[in-house]
Amino acid sequence: MGVDFGREPRRRLRAPDWVFWLAALGGPVAVTAVLVHYSQQTQRDYVFIYLGLVAVVGVLRGLWPALTCAGISFLLVDYFFVPPVGTWTIADEQDIVNLIAFLVTAGLVGLLASRRRRALLAAQALTRQLSESNTELVRLNQQHAEAATAALRLARSEQQITALNETDRLRRELLANVSHELRTPLGTILTESTDASSAQLGAEAERRLETIAVEARRLKALVDDMLDMTVIEGGALHLELEPLVLGDAISAGADRLKRTAPGRAVVWDPAASAVEVLADWDRLGQIFDNLLSNADRFAPPDTSIKIAVARQEPGLIVVRVIDRGPGVPVELRGRIFERFFHSDVDAAEKTGGIGLGLAIVRGLVEAHAGTVALEDTGDEPGATFRFTLPEAPSQA
């Protein structure tokens, strides 16, 4: 820790050098101008005034201005105060001794004053250095404390991330294991219920078996969705990419929707859809099934679902699935591709599975190096889901 030396001393205003030299040269003249008007009885004490002036100059500026002030004082004292007055001649030997003693004393005073000044300057410089060092130590201590705090936060974040990753891994493993174990009994239920329904049974028994088969198919679809989501999130999705005619996939998807929703029409342009994309046939069919099923669930019964195909970006084919339903509220548009997301309509009608359909669509589209989004239709009713697929390389 640094030692607090308090605030840095306020720097004094430093006069220019010529001011001190002016004092060294003019000070003795001013003192002499004052002393010549006093009586001879006080002239014995003039030497102390000159010595004081020499000491002040030495403290403020140093040795050489002090010596200069002493020399001028010696000459002025000899001329104005030592008999014969008005000449540089000295009649009395005692006066010579006194003047020499004055000159030596003035020199010593100037020397001591200049040394005092150098010591004072050195002390001030040392104080500034200590203050700067203390400030630097405080800054370094603060930086060290901040770095230690940041390292602690980072370590805690890494621990939390590791724990979350481990929890997520265990969750995916549990989901995959449970889903996988559910497939076998579901397959058996479907097989037995459909085979038994074709036998010679009563109408009531056949109706109940058909209900079992329908619910088993619905449960199987949910299990398949959970397995697909686990595979996508685990990065284990395998795609068999090949050039496919997009119109064939759209037609097959429309036919599958027709079997579950006979009254729903799917409108699309075969000419615009006669483009080849690089995709996995089964996974592309799954994308269309989920989007068409989502549109069928929300669109009014007397409306059609439109599929539009365009080449709007180099090397990418843009597909839009458009319905005339109520659309998606603005506050929910950022969440519809999340896992297990349900809209208010799903909650009210208790439909829509477990909310994995659009999350699976996003995972499959991104696995094809594409993007999927909900487009803003403005004031138009309905929802438009837009996704892209890579165009197959030309065979030419």
Image (cartoon, grey):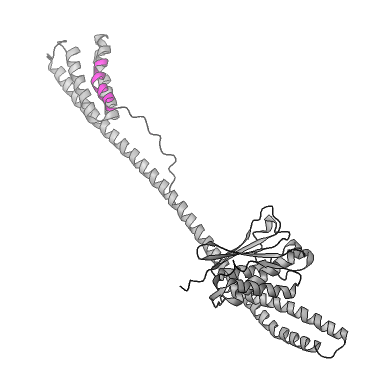
Question: Is residue 11 in the magenta section?
Answer: yes
Residue 360: x %, y % from top left = 63, 70
Residue 300: x %, y % from top left = 76, 63
Q: Within the image, what quadrant is residue 308 found in? A: bottom right
The one of 316 and 369 positioned closer to us in this rendering: 316
Name which residue lies at 48% across and 71% down: 394
Measured along the vertical axis of the image, is residue 396 above or below residue 326?
below
Residue 186 visible in the shown view: yes
Q: Within the image, what quadrant is residue 309 found in? A: bottom right
Residue 169 visible in the shown view: no
Measured along the vertical axis of the image, is residue 127 above or below residue 166?
above
Measured along the vertical axis of the image, is residue 250 above or below residue 207?
above
Name which residue lies at 20% across and 20% down: 72
Question: Is residue 74 in the magenta section?
Answer: no
Q: Within the image, what quadrant is residue 160 found in? A: bottom right
Name which residue lies at 58% across and 69% down: 365
Q: Quadrant of the C terminus?
A: bottom left
Describe residue 90's horizontal placement relative to residue 233 as left or right: left
Residue 1: x %, y % from top left = 44, 52
What span is in magenta?
7-30
Q: Which residue reaches farthest front? A: 271
Residue 236: x %, y % from top left = 56, 76
Q: How many marks overall? A: 0
The one of 65 and 347 positioned closer to us in this rendering: 347
The one of 377 and 89 positioned closer to us in this rendering: 377
Q: Which residue reaches farthest bottom? A: 200
Describe residue 43's horizontal placement relative to residue 264 as left or right: left
